[in-house]
Image: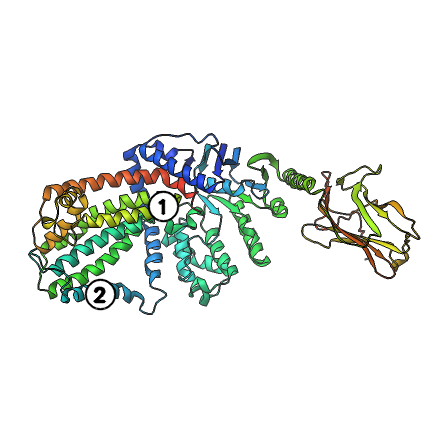
Amino acid sequence: MSDVLIKVDHLSKKFCRSLKRSMYYGVTDALKTMVGINYSTDTLRPSEFWSLNDISFKLRKGETLGILGANGSGKSTLLRLLAGIFPPDHGKIEINGNIGALIAVGAGFHPHMTGYENIYLNGTILGLTKDRIDEIINDITTFSEIPEDALNAPVATYSSGMKVRLGFSVAMHSEPDILLVDEVLSVGDIGFKNKAVRKMNEFREKANGLIFISHDLEQMRMLCDRVIVLDKGKCVFEGETEKGCIAYEEIIRDHKIKNNIKLKRLSNVVYTNDVIDLRDIQTVDSSSRNLSNIGLSDQLIISVKFKLNEVLEDLSIHVKIATEAQPFFWIIELANDYNNKKNFGTLNAGVYFVKIKLDNHNLTPGVYNFGTVTFRNNKTFETYNKTQIEKIFTVNSENKKYDKGVVNVNDFWSIEKVD
Amino acid sequence: MGNKVVYEPNQYAKIGFLKTMLVIVKNTIASKELIFQLYKRDFLMQYKKSFLGLGWMIFGPIMGVVSWVLMDSAGVLSPGDVGVPYPVYVLFGTSIWGLFMSFFTSTSQTLQIAAGFIQQVNFHHEALVFKQGLQNLTNFGISLIINIVVMLSFGVIPTWFILLIPLFIIPIFLLAASLGLMVSILSTLTSDVSRIASFFLSLLMFITPVIYDSSEKVVWLQQCNLYNPLTYLITAPRDLILTGTMSNPFYYIISIVMAILLFMVALRFFYISEKKVIEKMI
């Protein structure tokens, strides 16, 4: 008896970008079907594109498979195909067992019906019988943490969090053999999220199969044995979770770099009084060559090139570095007075390179963005020039482990016995 | 766990015609609880946000009857020799026609009423077809009772054929649902279809002798009446219940057979196409 729960073979799915063409194809396909003409779905017609292209994998009993991919890579389409919501255009899916798909919670909820009524409605839609729902109704209501008086009130009066908890609770108790989870765990407060993760772990221990789609690499590492990585509909990696997460980060980075190349010329002078012009800011290596991808153990060297049009004293330079999550991640201030740092002294007119060098940059892998570079007078705070820069550099993990969060620090702790 | 399912392109077209019918019957029986839950959801919830609530189920048809009574007392409904008081004749005929229309309208929205969760959960969509029909039947049942009250007040006693009403309804449902299912599939693709369909249906009412008697009209209209299967499906129950006679039993039987065959064709079309059009429901 095979232990393969899901077998996906050269699966492909196409969609149409143009609304009018989509209508046209839909109507002609439907009429052909009515008359009994068979038509092939293997090739792309004008305006069509492959949302999933030649995907193959297996899910075995007891396994948790993660699916990673950027937005638009085909993850949700894959989930819907596995759930049987629409048919593939090429290839085959074989499934042994019932599938429960958590694609969106609260399917079919009617706002005027009470919590209890909606539990029965949603449960029946998900395939439970009334008798079974009667048996587990208490488990469902307890898990959802919704109080009794709310359960007897129309769902329209619920907060969005309550609606999600109710829907999720019914779905988690729908007892499928294979559970497909689509990023729904990103809802709810921490307490509920933890409960949800614990419930999913219970599920795994019952030796059922689980497919998990998320952007959250933490959750991937915690839950999944294997991952596949999708990029623009193709499967670009299949294997161990950690390697998959790294491959995924590289794809995100490559997308950003490609976008960045388009944006390289985008610098915007916000203010200038023509005393200083910013020529360039760039991350470089020790030979001053441009280096936009820096390893965990490399030096971080930032080079700022500017032209000074007159003699200047008391210059200070501020470089702002941002991440996607934090616009004010790091502001590097050069030649300021506090902490007695050295200053630039008196500068004559000319072109200058300022190098900011960090032997241990302590940054965690990710994508970093130069924000603005500001030139000011250190004493009077007069601003000479403020320029916005759209340029990124990335830090890669060199396949080493690193701390989670914004800062990576190694070997900073010690232990001694005191009694 | 021996539950093996395969998904491939064009798989629904690969199974034979008769096998499709069996699969649909099997799926419908398996979904009986779902049909009931969805029926509860859509039917009872219609009345939730009103003070009269379920009272509308009765009050609605009563209001319809009142307008008939007013028209009658104003002399609008012209007298004719149909063997029963004309107002009763017209009321009954239009109720049955109304049932046909409501079956058509509701089945033409089969996929649309589940818009939203139909793209999120996989379930037997046949359940939607029958749940729609059930809603219409409930409404008809109540207005039927009111119609009988009106009939009795005009001094007309229905014949025993009234007990066969469930049987008379079946071919009407089948014909309406055949058209409705096809419209439902096509109207997820383009909104032109439902507009054209409602125009077509209103034309259909003109060529079905519901509010007029065929014998006094021009020849081409009479020909339309003759070849229109809906003529028989609607007038036969009405005539049998009110007068105990039927004009054309043979053509009635043919109309029933046509309705059954058309329904099977429509079901097959629905079965093959519905999954493919769901992805276009935006």
Quadrant of the frame with the C terminus of chain A: bottom right
Kindly identify which chain the residue marked by label 2 belongs to.
Answer: B
Label 1 CA crowd tier, 10 Å (few <14, some 14–19, many 20+) = few
Residue A226 seen from this side: yes
Give the percent coordinates (x, y) of residue A235.
57, 34
Please state which of residues A37 and A121 is positioned toward the viewer in this rendering: A37
Picture residue at 19% right of the left edge, 47% below the top: B207
Q: Is residue A54 above or below residue B1?
A: above
Left or right: B4 in relation to B238: right
Q: Can you tell which mark lies on residue B62?
A: 2
Amino acid type of the residue that numbered disc 1 sits on in the rendered structure: Asp
Q: What secondary structure is marked by label 2?
A: helix
Residue A246 seen from this side: no
Q: Can you tell which mark lies on residue B192?
A: 1
Q: What secondary structure is marked by label 1?
A: helix
Picture residue at 20% right of the left edge, 56% below the top: B95
- Residue B142's image quarter? bottom left
Label 2 CA crowd tier, 10 Å (few <14, some 14–19, many 20+) = some
Amino acid type of the residue that numbered disc 2 sits on in the rendered structure: Ile
Left or right: A237 in relation to B165: right
Real-space Cα separation, disc 1 to disc 2, in angstroms: 35 Å
Please state which of residues A207 and B135 is positioned toward the viewer in this rendering: B135
